[in-house]
Amino acid sequence: MAATTLNTFPNNRVSALTMLFLENQDLSGLTPEQLAANYDDVFEKINLYFRETRKQKATTKE
């Protein structure tokens, strides 16, 4: 019997935090395009935060 791999969403902390943030926003007046744009914006901000903090931690270890 072959192993089954389940891919779930969110699959990483950036996606999870993005969804958590958006779930707590009033999205009722948004179009699907606006919602997608908001998701991309929030995802990029969270991702940038993690990249910058990782970079800062690496430079302080040197």
Image (spheres, grey):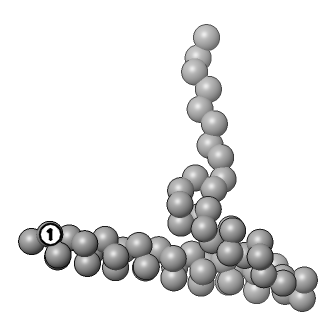
Residue 55 visible (yes or no) = yes
- In front here: 43 or 55? 55
Identify the residue at horizontal 25%, vertical 72% (top origin).
57
- In front here: 13 or 44? 13
Residue found at the far top of this picture? 1
Name the spot of residue 25 as percent of width and height, x first. Answer: 78, 81
Residue 31 visible (yes or no) = no
Identify the residue at horizontal 68%, vertical 68% (top origin).
19
Identify the residue at horizontal 59%, vertical 84% (top origin).
41
Q: Quadrant of residue 15?
A: bottom right
Q: What amino acid is found at the position of numbered circle 1 in the picture?
A: Lys
Q: Taking 17 as reference, is 28 left or right?
A: right
Callout 1 secondary element: helix
Residue 44 in the image: above or below residue 4: below
Residue labelled with disc 1: 61
Name the spot of residue 21 as percent of width and height, x first. Answer: 68, 75
